[in-house]
Amino acid sequence: MNVVFIVPTGIGAEIGGHSGDATPAAKLIASTCDKLFIHPNVVNASDINEMTENMIYVEGSILDRFLEGEIGLRESKGNRILLAVNEVKPEIVNAASAARATIGADIEIVQLERPIEMMAHLDNGKASGAIRGGAEAVEQIKPYDFDVLVVNTPIETYSDTVIEYLTKQGGVNLWGGIEARLSKFMSRELNRPVFHAPVENSEVFKAFHDVVDPRKAAELVSVCYLHCCLKGAHVTPRIAGVMDRGYRNYDVDFLVVPIGVWGRPHEACAKAGIPIIAVEENRTVLEDTMLKNVIVVKNYLEAAGVISAKKAGVSLCSVRRPLERTVINP
């Protein structure tokens, strides 16, 4: 039983829209299946990443290509990580050294000749932004010998927007949208997994010491915001070609998503005949999309029940009441 678990970033998902706060729900779903394919937004919580052993950590655009049947995925451990930064700082070196000492990571640090500039903002209530220097970074990185790229660069944004996000319940994570755009662009150009971790350079953020929404708390207890990506990159799967061994989209039994969201993964699963479970409690800032041929459940507890029923070979109607009588034709 293999499941894909998605919580799109930058759209204010009630569960998973902040800082690794979909992790408990993902751990629950992971307990019902053999492998749980996730993308970074599900478990990334700055210096915290509590993914389970059976979770497969996949960059978003690579996960899209996997579900579309373009590529396969081959599990890997001990990937060679290239860590690209605008400036080599002591806290970055310490974060890389900590990953070497605790998880046994293989990390090489490279300073970019042309710094990557990222500016985050909200666009119609969704996280967005602009990027400069991404193409130049790709050209500099291409000659290096590595399996996975982690980019650790600053994200600029407006101070008042940061304060508003930190001081209210919920809201849209400002940084996730622009991070996803950069990682998708670089992954496509390099045909390798790319993950982004922000260098927090906002003086307002650094000076903020109040109690926050628990879903955002990981941001306030972190120093470098990097370890979550290093832990995921250490074991992220390699892209498998047509003739290579590995997982294919036909090995996936379910896609689990927030309610009212529809995009490339959903289209791919609908085309491939992979059942989609939409969770009502996990709403976003998006207007609900009309979903067709989707199993709608109230919460992740119910989603776990649907997956468990499938694994046990039990039809959903057979465990609900009233149970319809079997029709006997004379």
Image (cartoon, rainbow, N blue to C red):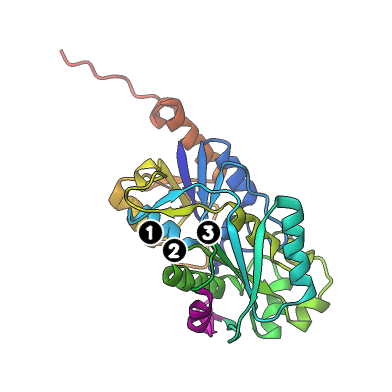
Percent position of residue 136, x then y: 50, 84
Residue bounds of the magenta highlight: 121-141
Residue 190 image-quadrant placement: bottom left
Q: Earlier in the sequence, mark 3 or mark 1?
A: 1
Taking 262 as reference, is 45 left or right?
Answer: right
Q: Are marks 3 and 1 in contact (CB under 8 Å)?
A: no
Residue 19 appears anywhere in the view: no
- Is 126 in front, or is 223? 223
Residue at x 53%, y 48% (from the top left corner)? 76
Percent position of residue 106, x then y: 65, 58
Magenta stretch contains residue 8? no
Residue 161 image-quadrant placement: bottom right
For marks 3 and 2, give the one nearer the viewer.
2
Label ID, residue 61: 2
Q: List the residue tagged with mark 3.
A: 283
- Outermost residue on the left side: it is 330
Label ID, residue 65: 1
Q: Is residue 234 above or below residue 304?
A: below
What amino acid is at disc 2? Ser
Q: Are marks 2 and 1 in contact (CB under 8 Å)?
A: yes
For marks 3 and 1, give the one nearer the viewer.
1
- Is 79 in front, or is 254? 79
Residue at x 37%, y 61% (from the top left corner)? 264
What amino acid is at disc 3? Arg
Q: Are marks 3 and 2 in contact (CB under 8 Å)?
A: no
